[in-house]
Amino acid sequence: MESSAPSLLMVEGSFYDQVDELAQYLDTVKQTPGALSGELAPLAEAEEKDAIVRRLVDASSALSQAPEKGTLWIRLLFFSVINLPHHPCMDET
């Protein structure tokens, strides 16, 4: 019989740390080292969270090129970042 216990996802780091990790991964998948990371850096410095999320959503089509096996963590991180409330206290970790 299957367990119906809830799954727990723990994502650590600030919003910007998580964005950087996502950007680096997407750059690797798209074989464009530093492209998305470089594009998001000025937005992060200006604390333009909505613009960052929009750009990540635009770039997320690269996830369809990534192998499914072993990449669940990046997909969960992506959904966590785009659904994260944009409150200043969330960035203090």
Image (cartoon, rainbow, N blue to C red):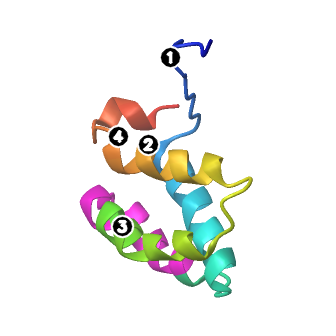
Q: Is disc 2 placed on a helix, strand or loop?
A: helix
Mark 2 highlights which residue?
Answer: 80
Question: Identity of the amino acid at label 3?
Answer: Val
42 vs 33, left or right, is: left
The residue range painted magenta reads 36-51
Mark 2 vs mark 1, CA separation in Å: 16 Å
Precedes in sequence: disc 3 or disc 4 = 3
Gap between marks 4 and 2 measured at Cα: 6 Å
- Image quadrant in which the N terminus is located: top right
Position of 88 with respect to 4 (left or right) is left
Image point (72%, 56%), residue name: 69
- From the image, tell me which residue sits under label 3: 57
Q: Nearer the viewer, residue 14 or 77?
A: 77
Residue at 51% x, 13% y: name it: 4
Q: What numbered label is drawn on residue 15?
A: none
Disc marking residue 6: 1
Q: Earlier in the sequence, mark 1 or mark 4?
A: 1
* Circle 1: element type: loop
Q: Secondary structure at mark 4?
A: loop
Residue occupied by mark 4: 84
The nearer-to-camera label among 2 and 1 is 1
Q: Earlier in the sequence, mark 2 or mark 1?
A: 1
The image position of residue 28, as x and y in percent, is 69, 76
Residue at left offset 53%, top offset 47%: 77
